[in-house]
Amino acid sequence: MKKVEAIIKPSKVSAIQAGLKEADIPCFTVIPVKGSGLQKSYSEKYRGTERTMVLQTRVMIMCIISDENLDKCVDVILEHASDGVVGDGKIFIYDVQDAIRISTKVRGNEAIR
């Protein structure tokens, strides 16, 4: 099993959700995040005062998937999240040791289906 974390622009979430559902990967978690990467800071006016903002508002999508679905999941995120510019985001992939569905106590790949 793998854990895929993608930090993306908030405007891309619905397209990625539709793509994952179409690819039979319907389960994922969305978390609002702020951070900075390679993109430059930007200026924003707030109550008449211009402020330099360093932290960008982004969304982190997490999917726990079987090894067979890894390439499919990554391809969907790459296809729907990219505008081809700095600041599109990043994808991180981790190994997952086990998963347990609490309601039925099923473990492993069966727990994430």
Image (cartoon, rainbow, N blue to C red):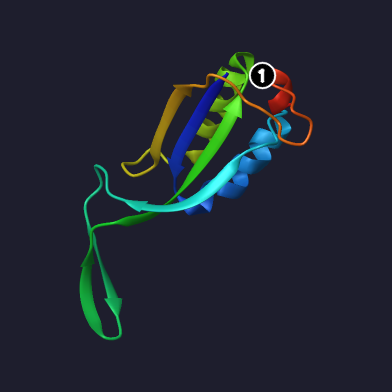
Q: Position of residue 16 (x, y in %)?
A: 59, 40
Question: What's the residue type where badge 1 is placed?
Answer: Gly
Q: Nearer the viewer, residue 26 or 16?
A: 26
Taking 38 as reference, is 84 left or right? right
Determine the image quadrant of residue 7: top left
Label tally: 1
Q: Residues within 10 Å of mark 1 (few under 14, many from 20)?
A: some
Residue at coordinates 54% horizontally, 21% vertically from top-left? 2
Farthest residue toward the top?
68
Q: At 49% from the left edge and 40% from the top edge, which residue is drawn?
A: 81
Judge from the rendering whether residue 69 lies leftward or rightward of residue 11; answer left or right: right
Is residue 82 visible in the rendered image? The answer is no
Answer above or below: position of 8 versus 55.
Answer: above
Residue at far bottom of view: 48
Tell me the quadrant of the picture where the N terminus can be found.
Answer: top right
Q: Is residue 99 above or below residue 55?
A: above
**Vertical comparison of 57 with 105: above or below:** below
- Residue 11 visible in the displayed image: yes
| Residue 17 x/y as whole percent | 64, 42
Name the residue tied to disc 1: 108
Label 1 element class:
helix
The C terminus, quarter of image: top right
At x 52%, y 27%, the residue is 3
Query: What residue lies at 61% left-to-right and 44% top-to-bottom?
Result: 15
Q: Position of residue 97 (x, y in %)?
A: 53, 19
Pick the front one: 95 or 100? 100
- The answer to whether 4 appears left or right of 68 in the picture is left
